[in-house]
Image: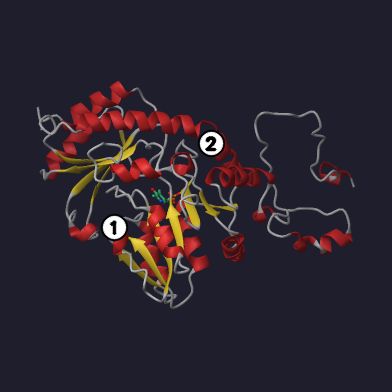
Amino acid sequence: MDQLSPNSSNGQVETAGWRSLSPATYRGSTIVYPDYESFLKRGEGGRKAFTYGLAGTPTSRLLQARLTEMEEAVDTFLVPSGLLAITVSMLALLKPGDTVLIPETVYGPVRRFASETLAVMRINAQYYDPRSTNNIAFDDPKLRLVWVESPGSITMELQDIADISRRARARGILVGCDNSWASPYLCKPIALGADIVVEAVSKTLSGHSDLLMGSISVASEAIADPIHRTIRSLGIGVSPDDCFLALRGLETAELRIKHAGQSGLQLARHLCDTKRFPLIEAVLHPGLSNDANHALWTSQFTGSNGVFSLALAKENGEAHGRRYQRLKTFSLGASWGGTHSLLAPSVIVDGRCAGKYDGKRFLRLSIGLEPVSVLLSDLDAFFSEADG
Ligand SMILES: *Cc1c(COP(=O)(O)O)cnc(C)c1O
């Protein structure tokens, strides 16, 4: 028996008196039961019971509870990426023959999911221009779900979440909202009427560019059930270590967002000087008072995150490429919401917003925690025409 002794207590140690400010990371696949009866009944405890590591740990439950409270939701599910939070929501709620309406400004990889996976399932994904609720075909009898992303990826169009939700609900249509830019600190889509809210926890909420996770928060038990069943049937779970890191990120998320939001707005205002920065055609930031989305932003958001975009004028590709060599603080990289400032160049080619951006070069900025003066001089050097 000696070789079994390290496990003879099933890994349990006394925890009385251990009152840490930090949450514990509970690792484990197997749950053990005190007797035969409780083992047989282990499936009867509902989705909150501990049955297997994949079904959740005390660490993941704590993160779920925090997010549920922040989102004003009924429950929250965790998945290994923000993209999966979107795709699992769609898989759970749509069936063959249904229509899902997706904004043209949706997080790019969702388009691939629609064309490669939803299409095979005979689920009809259609895109709408997000600039007006009137562009949403609520009268399609097969419409089951309207997807919303506000502001939209890269081109930053806001959507009226309350108006969309009201019109959808009147017809029994569900509304799902990708709230990654705002996070629950700046916008609460469920309070505005959405049925599902998805966060890319990988971004601002965890906040340090060191983990991938997504959350799905739901407004009712009726929606929690299909989401739970889909997650269970696919065998999706998240690591307790990642949950710990996300919980630690949440401790500072509100302060980080506030800081990045203020720095971002200051930089956005600085870059509006078109005489000084002829390469910049438009600064796309809903916090700017002359932005087309400003009134909606004021009514549905309580502030801005440090992520905004610039529409750039035409420029020779090589000359443009040389600008990046002048950067001292900004790094080049996709993703956003971390402590380090990033630039992500892209060219829009997907025909969004009646094609008004097609072929145009964009630069998305994700502002981190560096001093704003340092970022300002980096951007001044980047946009300088002196040796460009
Ligand atoms: C990054 C992003 C996602 C996806 O999150 P991942 O965790 O990287 O999969 C979803 N929505 C938006 C708006 C994003 O920017």
Tell me where residue 336 sits by quadrant. Answer: top left
Amino acid type, mark 2: Leu
Q: Disc 1 or 2, which lies upstream in sequence?
A: 1
Asked whether, in this view, residue 296 is left or right of residue 14, the answer is left
Nearer to the camera, 221 or 7: 221
Which residue occupies 58% across, 47% down?
68
Amino acid type, mark 1: Ser
Disc 1 secondary structure class: loop
Nearer to the camera, 191 or 224: 191
- Residue identified by numbered label 2: 250
Residue 352: where, in percent of width, then height? 24, 58
Which residue occupies 40% across, 64% down?
113
Residue 15: where, in percent of width, then height? 79, 34
Residue 156: where, in percent of width, then height? 30, 47
Nearer to the camera, 317 or 191: 191
Disc 2 secondary structure class: helix
